[in-house]
Image: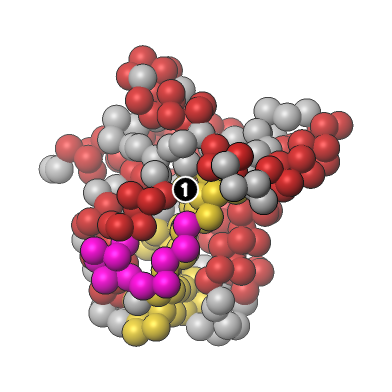
Amino acid sequence: MDNRIHNELQHGKKLLEEGAEAIWNWDSPAGRVRADRRAALLAKYSEIKPGEMALEIGCGTGLFSNKFRNLTQAKVIATDLSPELLEVAKQKYSGIEFRLEDAMNLNLDDNSFQVVFGSSVLHHLDFHKALKEIYRVLKPGGRMVFAEPNMINPQIFIQKNVPFIKKWLGDSPDETAIVRWKFKKILEQNGFKNVEIIPYDFLHPVVPSFLISIVNGTGKILERIPIAKEIAGSVIISAVK
């Protein structure tokens, strides 16, 4: 078995044991605000219409599968490498087809989906292998849209590059983060066009409830300032086949 796949399978088991959405920081008050905004941005940049086919890779426990489906009324097939996380997703959400798939070797037909989307998954994968598969299963003119951690953010830079901190915080060994100008080149090398990679999100998941509106408002101002926005916590990536 490929080392990366082995590591991600072990990571999935650990997430299940310790509480996936707590580890991913989606279950705090600020985390829930972040998740709703992330889902809204994925839906917006997907430009998908009700009834069209969307593929999610790295769906985990199905949080964004469900949010995306509810926001867009698309038909969603949601995939993950971890059978344990998929079982949780199947128990939590109906009306979504959950499938066990390796995002770098999808058992899906060419030109099948109007949109391929995901939340915090590409940074776990071999970029070129994953993008080749995303490109293959997208219909001509179809769109990929992903939300990923921003390597230029100081906390994320330390977390992804200092080994003992990476291990302490529960990251899998192979995961990294996105440097947006480098990733734009990788997307273009793999045939994508109309590439947009937009830094956003200054709301940290540990922000207490009474400060969320202030921090969120300040963050949205920073997102409009050219240099300041580069250190935002996340990026939204969109591109067209």
Q: Is residue 220 left or right of residue 210?
A: left
Q: Is residue 188 magenta?
A: yes
Q: Is residue 163 left or right of residue 149?
A: left
What residue appears at the point 29 percent right and 65 percent down from the top-left corner? 188
Q: Which residue is mark 1?
A: 148
Residue stretch rendered in magenta on the structure: 187-197
Task: Quarter of the image for the N terminus: give it.
Answer: top left
User: Residue 86 appears at what percent x and percent y?
Assistant: 43, 52
Residue 94 in sight from this viewpoint: no
Identify the coloring. secondary structure
What residue appears at the point 47 percent right and 41 percent down from the top-left corner? 150
Say if 200 sits above or below 172 in the image.
below
Find the residue positioned furthest to the left: 1
Tag 1's secondary structure? strand
Say if 77 sits above or below 154 in the image.
below
The three-letter amino acid code for the residue at tag 1 is Glu
User: Residue 171 appears at what percent x and percent y?
Assistant: 39, 30
Rendering quarter of residue 26: top right
Find the residue positioned furthest to the top: 164
Residue 173 in sight from this viewpoint: yes
Task: Quarter of the image for the C terminus: give it.
Answer: bottom left
